[in-house]
Image (cartoon, grey):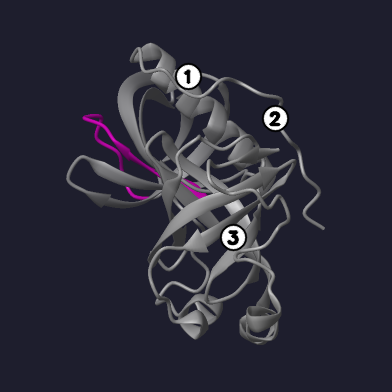
Amino acid sequence: MQRLAGHDNPSPSFSADTPENQDQREADRLRLLMRTAKLVTSQGEFLCVLRDASVGGFRARIFHPLPTDAEMELELASAHRYPIEKVWEKDNEAGFRFTEKIALEELVNELTPYPKRGVRLNLELETDIQVGDQRARATLENLSQQGARIDTLQPLAQAQRLLLNITGMRAVTAQVRWRDGDTYGLAFEDTFQFDELALLVYQLQRQQSARKGIRSDPAAPLRRIDLR
């Protein structure tokens, strides 16, 4: 179990469990079931699932060891961000506290103009696409369970099918949904499971750091979690 310096209580709580604040903490806590989100850190962006939350902090399921950063940001699918601090980490769960005052109802309701939009992970990975028998270089800019955004000099038509190839990731068949200059939005024909994507992005970002000569946190066994 990893604990930050200065935190001696290993229990999954967000503040000291004293008689004075226990009742208030329980009153402020709400149950968030299967709320997907991402943790934005200095070493990349990583998927998680929010569980219990209060005005003080939250508990989340994680799929791999987290970076040692104390300060992070929590970002929901709505793109709302909350500055947070990691308090504890054990097995497939971690606890965080909010470092600024939040509107809990906003977090719980997650109002967004894109109700079916999945969490997007910002990346910058060199890859290639295959259109018919032609291959072209591309940059992967973000990735989600359902699709990706790429930048390429290869002209692509609306609804054009292609194969997206990324080192360390299975090839994915996709269709072009939109275009903005050399930037294209892709929809996958075979989507990713949430835990599959979480592990994949973790591995891709470690590989990217290694290629750039950036030292990342030591590797540890990956965690496959049943989300049911």
**What's the amino acid at mark 1?**
Gln
User: As shown in the figure, which amino acid type bears the numbered disc 3?
Assistant: Thr
Whether 170 is among the magenta residues is no
**Three-letter amino acid code at disc 2?**
Leu
Residue 130 to residue 196: above or below: above
Residue 193 in view here: no
Q: CA distance from mark 2 to mark 1?
A: 15 Å
Relative depth, front residue between 187 and 225: 225
Q: Main secondary structure of the magenta part?
A: loop
Quarter that holds the C terminus: bottom right
Give the magenta part as a residue range: 145-158
Q: Callout 3: 10 Å neighbours few (<14), some, many (20+)?
A: some
Q: Residue at x 50, y 19 (%)?
A: 167
Residue at 71%, 38% in the rendered image: 1
Displayed quadrant of residue 214: top left
Find residue 30 and name its label. none
Which residue is the site of mark 1? 207
Which residue is at the far front?
A: 19
- Secondary element at tag 2: loop
Instruction: Give the residue at mark 2.
Output: 222
Lateral position of residue 84 relative to residue 139, left or right: right
Q: Which sits earlier in the primary sequence, circle 2 or circle 1? A: 1
Q: CA distance from mark 3 to mark 1?
A: 24 Å
